[in-house]
Amino acid sequence: LLRLPPPPHRLEALVEEAFSASDLKERLIEELGPLEASLAAALDALSETVGKMAAAEKVAAVTETSTTTEASTIKRNREEEKEGEKEGEKRRSCSLKEKDEVNKAQQQQRQQQQ
C-alpha cells in the first residue's frame, strides 16, 4: 500500500504544533534559568544556616560540658576545703589534748618533786 501524504491542512497543523512546542521549550528554558539560579542561592543559604546551627549545637554541647565540669570542680574543691577544715579541727583538738596531757604530766612531776 502506498502512503499518501497528509492533507495540506493537517501538514500545516503539524508544523505549527512543532513550532509551538519548540517555542514553548525555549520560553520554559528562559523562565526556568533565573529560577534555577534562585533555587541554587536558596540552597546555599540553607546549607550555610544548617552549618551555623550545627556549629552552634557543638558550642552549646562544649559549653554545657565545660559548665558541668566547672560545677563538679567547684563542688570537689568545697568538699576538699571542708575535709581540710575537719582535719585542722582534729589536729587542733589533738594538740590541745596533747598539751593537756603534757601539762598534767608536768604538774604530776612537780607534785612528786615537792
Image (spheres, grey):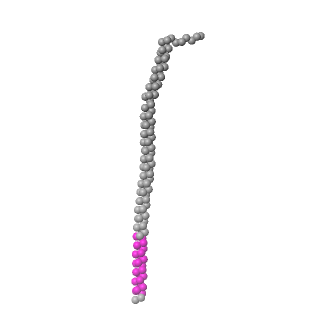
User: How far across and down, in percent of the image, does residue 95 sit?
Assistant: 42, 75
Q: Nearer the viewer, residue 77 or 100?
A: 77
Q: Which of 67 and 18 is in front in this view?
A: 18
Q: Nearer the viewer, residue 94 or 3?
A: 3
Q: Quadrant of residue 31?
A: top left
How many numbered dots are placed on residues in this image? 0
Q: In which quarter of the image is the C terminus?
A: bottom left
Range of magenta residues? 89-112
- Taking the magenta stretch, the answer to whether it contains residue 52 is no
- Taking the magenta stretch, the answer to whether it contains residue 99 is yes
User: How far across and down, in percent of the image, does residue 40 sit?
Assistant: 45, 36
Instruction: State the residue lying farthest toward the right.
Output: 1
Q: In this view, does 2 lie to the left or right of 85?
A: right
The residue that appears at 48% across and 12% down in the rendered structure is 9
Instruction: State the residue lying farthest toward the bottom.
Output: 114
User: How far across and down, in percent of the image, does residue 62 sit?
Assistant: 44, 51
The residue that appears at 40% across and 86% down in the rendered structure is 110
The residue that appears at 44% across and 37% down in the rendered structure is 43
User: How far across and down, in percent of the image, does residue 59 sit?
Assistant: 43, 49
Q: Is the magenta stretch mostly helix, strand or loop?
A: helix
Q: Is residue 94 above or below residue 17?
A: below
Q: Is residue 61 above or below residue 80?
A: above
Q: In which quarter of the image is the N terminus?
A: top right
Q: Is residue 100 above or below residue 12?
A: below
Q: In this view, does 1 lie to the left or right of 45?
A: right
Q: In which quarter of the image is residue 47?
A: top left
